[in-house]
Image (cartoon, grey):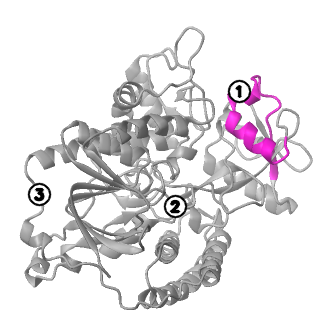
Amino acid sequence: MNTTRRHAVVLIIGSGVAGCSAALTLADAGCDVLLLNAGEQLTDGNSELAQGGIIYRAASTAGQPQADDARALEKDILVAGHYVNSRKAVRHLCRQGPTCIDTMLLLRAGVQFDRNTDGSFSLTREGGHCSPRILHRADFSGQAIMEGLTAAVLTHPRITRLHKRPVIDLLTTHHHAKNSQYRYDVANRCLGAYVLNEENGEPETVLADFTVLATGGVGQVFLHSTNAPGCVGAGISIAFRAGVSLANLEFVQFHPTALYEERSNRRPLVTEAMRGEGARLLDLKGRPFMRRYDNRGDLAPRDIVAIAMMEEMLHNGAPCLFLDASCINKDLPSSFPTVFKTCSDAGLDIRNEPIPVVPAAHYFCGGVLADTRGRTSMRGLYAIGECACTGLHGANRLASSSLLEALVWGVSCGQDLSKRVNSGDSLPKRLASSIPDWRHGGDERRDDPALVAQDWTNIRNTMWNYVGIARTNARLRRAFEDMRDLVRHIHDFYKYTRISRRLVDLFHGSQTAYVITQAAMRNTASIGCHHRID
């Protein structure tokens, strides 16, 4: 294979809110950035799909002094996370959030959020929040934010973009340097990554002084998911193989309300903001049921709502439940245009028909362990956004905190990296020359779509049935045994088959599912979105 070699000062893998905000922060500070993503455009990830909004703490939120509202937000995050959050990360988000929104989204990206007739921001409330503090653009907030960020990224002269470049593996001194002397360094260092150029089918070697993982979530390893197709846990997989510290992998949040429709593995999201505006969950007989499970009713945190829904479905043998939005005192087509159109396309008029909904894998609270600057346990490697575990979410994520986390950590990571870049902390040339190009053990074209599809079916069904919303020791052990055998098989298959996007995704997905299962087995406590019924 003829492998292309590139060198980047900062390599960012992933182009959602986290990746784009980090890239802009670095580029605005005078640093050159190489931004890679696996899709055909910058908006192919989960950020674009976010509906509800972003937390915006301001003095007008509840007519309180700003410090009081910060403390109230901290408490809501801790309660939702069952108090196993990193308090340092929670404080960092609450203190930096408003400034990041003001400077990056409102001023730099020019995002237009909904406003009241008097010009003030239209703030809404979602489950787990003590007051209305969610800044939004109808029900397509993620799309609005990404439009602003990508417009700024596309015109910045210091940001180079490469699309259709799924990451294969991280480059490290301990694993890849041909000069054995580098292996005696106590600290393993990230040197960039191998990526696949889908346009010509060849791997590329991208050497970098610093590498940032912003690869998104893991939802596609489950049967039902709200995630974008490419969210197979690539960042988790490559970090695990490189020996980078991971944390909280058992905490997978399931969104309570995804449209029950058999069209694809990705189930369209029905935003939680609808329940914030008064929509109610109903059982098969049209009766509200959430008050039986929690005194907060339909506004309880997501893990509680998802578990209650599964209990109802299992007890009654129901394939789905229903969300009644007819009681919302707003014009649904204009207030929730995305949900309204999605349901209309499915033949539903939500103004007078309840929406069939099921829980679906939605957000990954665990990931690559990272501090408030995005630094990981490996020198030269950062992780931000959903693939990172900052400790912010603890055992369960508070609604509308994900976009804010991605933004705050993207900016914080960019600020930290710009200082390191400008201080001259770069990759030694002789070390870069010690890194070989990609070499594959086999060149057979055996990635039969039917074989790959069957492996994915096994992964997704195993994870949904055994490592899903309700877990037991017996289920987890069965999943561990099944995934161990499958991973071994896929490793052998990968070794002797010519590399392709299908194979790379399958490899990452199987590895990610395996480490999630192992983490769930180790944690015998039932807490948050790691719900053990035994």
| Residue 107 as seen in the image, left or right of residue 231 | left
Q: Nearer the viewer, residue 51 or 166?
A: 166
| Residue 492 as seen in the image, left or right of residue 474 | left
Does the magenta portion include 332? yes
Q: Nearer the viewer, residue 454 or 197?
A: 197
SS at mark 1?
helix
Label 1, label 2: how many angstroms apart (C-alpha)?
A: 30 Å
Q: Can you give x and y, in whole percent of width and height, for residue 190 in the image?
A: 22, 66
Tell me whether circle 3 and circle 2 mark residues in contact (CB < 8 Å).
no
- Which stretch did the figure color magenta? 321-348
Residue of label 3: 426
* 522 vs 180: above or below: above
Residue of label 1: 334
What amino acid is found at the position of numbered circle 2 in the picture? Cys
Where the N terminus falls, by quadrant?
bottom left
What label does residue 231 carry, if any?
A: 2
